[in-house]
Image (cartoon, rainbow, N blue to C red):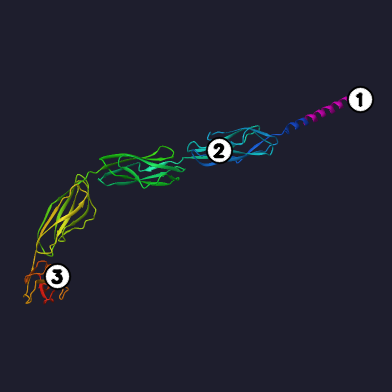
Amino acid sequence: MSNFSQSVLRGQVYLRLVTLSLVVVSTCLSSFAVTQPAGKLRAVPGTVQFGRVVVGQSSQASCIISNTGTAPVTISKVVPSNPAVVLSSPALPLVLSPGANAVLTFTFTPKNASSLQARIAVGSTASPEPTIELRGRGLPPGALSVQPSSVDFGAVSPASSAANGVRVKNIGFSDVHISGAQVIGNGFTVTGSQFPMTLAPAQSVTLNVLFTPATGQASGRLTIESDAAGPKAVVSLSGTLDPPGALTINPRTVVFGGVGIGKTKKVRVLLTADRGKVVISSLGTSTSEFTLSAVHLPLQIAAGKSRPLMVGFAPEANGQATGSLLLTSDAANSPVVILRGAGTGYRVLLSWTGSTSPVTGYDVYRSSRQGGPYKILNSTPNPDTSFIDTTVKTGQTYYYVVTSVDSAGVQSAFSGEVPAVVP
């Protein structure tokens, strides 16, 4: 081979070596670009839970954000997607070195009662950005409900009162402070309640409202003063003055006629309330011979209505008997009812031989059992030697004895016993 050929061959070899070197250099440059350091952010937990928060109040919750990369990361902004949430700490911008972390604290202040579903937008030098979810719920604040919303006391008699309860309940989720209850309207008052008072959520209290009428028609309003949310709790009030009723009794004079001793005759008497309601608080008769059927007191008779009353006559002696119906009510008038009857039946005529010693009179005794005990029939010594017992009953047997009484009031021993059988 000539010298020229050898030279060419050597040049080719040289060129190949150069080409191989360039390839190696290119490969080294590519590996250097891939190993550039980078920052990476991670948030734990990924969902921040505020729980249940009353509207107007605030709650804080946190998460930890960490730099899990190999280069520092600068956090320039943390923006919640809902204006009810704000970042409380830390201050921005914030630089996190590799492996470092920070606590992000958020404050949730709900504006209304609704669910919170939002996200946090994190602006930083890391890529990709971490995802942080926000969850919570706004609850309604303390609020009052009243039952019933209106109270009609109806017709109330003069000089009397009617009461009704109003239930006030906290239907919200925070305490309600009640400072008082304002009543507007003639005759309406709230009694038995101590203010101020506090109602916890779901707690209730009953206010006692009293109506004491002074005029015909009355209307008013009860307003609960409190720090509750929403409109004030208001109850409308109404009532009327019931005009005093007048009592009519028919008949005004009750005549029983003749009734045998030991028997009873009843007559129906009608009590009627005119113009207004009448309440009868007591009923009776002036003497024991006149009786009334069982009546439950107080007896209330509505305006324009009537109630029957059975009056009985059971004579205790022969002869005329007079009495009256005793009645107490709130009526404007006080009617008088006269009761008249006559006892008819058997009489026992007694006579005896007078004492041989000076006496002022005689006492007559009677018993329903042979041998006594005896009960005296006359209130003062009887000057005669005869006596008529008009208080006997049919079908009975009586036993009589007599004693003499001297001027000093000393009685003799009982006379012999005499029986009398009444058919």
CB within 8 Å, label 2 to label 3 = no
Q: Which residue is mark 3?
A: 376
Query: Within 10 angstroms of label 1, few (less than 14), some, or many (20 or more) residues?
Result: few
Q: Nearer the viewer, residue 319 or 72?
A: 319
First along the sequence among labels 2 and 3: 2
Q: Quadrant of the C terminus?
A: bottom left
Q: Nearer the viewer, residue 4 or 354?
A: 354
Q: Residue at x 71, y 34 (%)?
A: 37
Report the amino acid beneath label 2.
Thr
**Majority secondary structure of the magenta segment?**
helix
Decide if residue 44 is on the left or right side of residue 320: right
Query: What is the magenta range?
Result: 9-27
For the residue labelled by badge 3, is the local secondary structure a helix, a strand or a loop? Answer: strand
Q: Nearer the viewer, residue 357 or 216?
A: 357
Which is closer to the viewer, label 2 or label 1?
A: 2
Query: Within 10 angstroms of label 2, few (less than 14), some, or many (20 or more) residues?
Result: some
Q: Quadrant of the N terminus?
A: top right
Which quarter of the picture shows residue 260? bottom left
**Residue 284 in the image: above or below residue 62:** below
Which is closer to the viewer, label 2 or label 3?
A: 3
Q: Which residue is mark 2?
A: 107
First along the sequence among labels 3 and 1: 1
Q: Residue at x 28, y 40 (%)?
A: 218
Q: Which residue is mark 1?
A: 6
The picture places residue 32, in percent across and down from the top left corner, at 75, 32
Report the amino acid beneath label 3.
Ile
